[in-house]
Amino acid sequence: MSFNDEFELLLRARYPLIYIPTREEERLEAAIAHSAKQQGNRGVYIWDFVDGYQGNPTDAGFGRRNPLQALELVEKIPATVPAVFILRDYHRFLDDVAIARKLRNLARLLKAQPKNIVIVSPQIAIPDDLSEVLTVLEFPLPNLTEIRVELERLLAATGQSIDAKMVDELVRSCQGLSMDRIRRVLAKGIATHGTLQAEDVELILEEKRQTIRQTQILDFYPATERISDIGGLDNLKDWLLRRGGAFSERARQYGLPHPRGLLLVGIQGTGKSLTAKAIAHHWHLPLLRLDVGRLFAGLVGESEARTRQMIQLAEALAPCILWIDEIDKAFAGFDGRGDSGTTSRVFGTFITWLAEKNSPVFVVATANNIQALPPEMLRRGRFDEIFFVGLPNQEERRAIFGVHLSRLRPHNLQIYDLDRLAYETPDFSGAEIEQILIEAMHLGFSQNRDFTTQDILEAASQIIPLARTAQEQIQLLQEWAATGKVRLASRQTGLGSRIS
């Protein structure tokens, strides 16, 4: 159901108090005016703290700097006259006892009158005593059709003409931005080049990065890593390569649903985060990184609002990759105690979205401790697949050494004995192998020469891998993976690696 349909339904059902969180006042007020006209040509009254009521000569300035008086106009309008009252930034006054009481009184009164009060706020901030009388309605970001209409309007106003393919690319690039930001960035492109060009897509992407940074919830993460940068994990790479075209229109026509996501469980430093970055690069999709800790805030209801904002933003930027690193630490062992159930509500909102989402947001979650995750997270339907990423076996260690050395010393890779390096480094993770090479480079650099195979082996002898310092924990994780409850990322798994 679209916003207009849902809003008009609330008007017909006589929902007296409607709360709409959005930063797009102008666009929202235009949508409300359209719906009010459709519903019997209702009058629209707009109030803000500085100017009072606007747009109606009879009541111009009424309620200026007086939020309680602003509510009195609702009763002054005859009971039979249909009207919508828009109150901007009114969330700031909801904690006032007089205003809260007046709103509850109006909620009873307006059930029998064709009037509705709409509170417009950039965020959700509803006191407990008003939670039962206020109905929250989400106002989505512009969809593809709205963006296309605005772009074509701008092109017509400037007398420009661009080909349909470029229009499609610009429209898709603008997805996830507010209408004000879309207008500004397109105007910036015209001011820079005198016309819209293909290069303006980069301006739009930078505007997206700015928008995401301002939310302080998601990070727009650069993805330069390739699938070929991952050593081993052949089962996982095959699974990903098969789904490379699953976001295309051809896949929709074939009947394929959008891929839902992937949960990567395993030992630290085995390439789980690297895989998330490589997926985004290989599929040519933007990579959004979510720090779950940022969802939690001190004010009542703010954590849930941030979760909804994160979901809305991710879906608006779709198709995209949503990377959630170390999700086990965010939701480990929650029981709703000590935080008034905030964690439980955030978790419930999140996993419900995982199960029901139809948008092309591919979620890549990583976890080091599967036992710390709530069972609901592991249920089929949340993710397409759960992969265990274990310690690399000898063949995979050889591949990992090859990947790093081909980057560090591409011209004399042949001087390194990859087979011996792989054999002499049992129980080392990919991240630890990278640290071995850095230490070997320090050895060579300190002696004014290039580092050698022997330097790498010397460095390896000085580093104690996590598999030995956290032996019990890793042993339990490997035994769990060996039970067959999870799919193995490697063809020849490292479950049998020597831990001593």
Image (cartoon, rainbow, N blue to C red):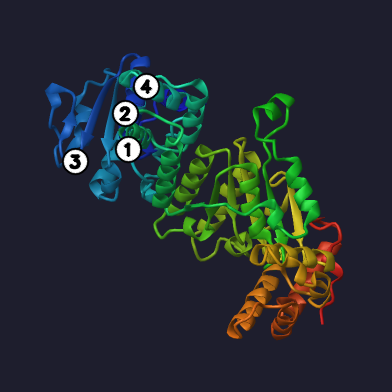
Badge 4: few (under 14), some or many (20 or more) residues near its Cα, within 10 Å? Answer: some
Disc 2 residue type? Glu
Instruction: Kindly report which numbered mark, 4 or 3, lies closer to the viewer in this rendering.
Output: 4
- The residues bearing labels 4 and 3 have C-alpha atoms spaced at a distance of 37 Å
Residue 312 visible in the snapshot: yes
Badge 3: few (under 14), some or many (20 or more) residues near its Cα, within 10 Å? Answer: some
Instruction: Kindly report which numbered mark, 1 or 4, lies closer to the viewer in this rendering.
Output: 4
Taking the spot 44% from the left edge, 34% from the top edge, the residue there is 141
Instruction: Kindly report which numbered mark, 1 or 2, lies closer to the viewer in this rendering.
Output: 2
Q: Secondary structure at mark 3?
A: loop
- The residues bearing labels 3 and 1 have C-alpha atoms spaced at a distance of 12 Å
Position of the C terminus, as image quadrant, is bottom right
Residue 369 visible in the snapshot: no
Q: State left or right for residue 310 relative to residue 22.
A: right
State yes or no: discs 1 and 2 in contact (Cβ < 8 Å). Answer: yes
| Lower sequence index among marks 3 and 1 | 3
Q: Label 4, on which residue?
A: 155
**Res 151 quadrant in image:** top left
| Lower sequence index among marks 2 and 3 | 2
Badge 2: few (under 14), some or many (20 or more) residues near its Cα, within 10 Å? Answer: some
- Give how far across and how far down residue 12 sits, in percent: 41, 21
Q: Secondary structure at mark 4?
A: helix
Eyeballing the image, is 464 above or below 318? below
Q: Label 3, on which residue?
A: 49
Closer to us: 472 or 203:
203
- Give how far across and how far down residue 299 sits, in percent: 39, 57
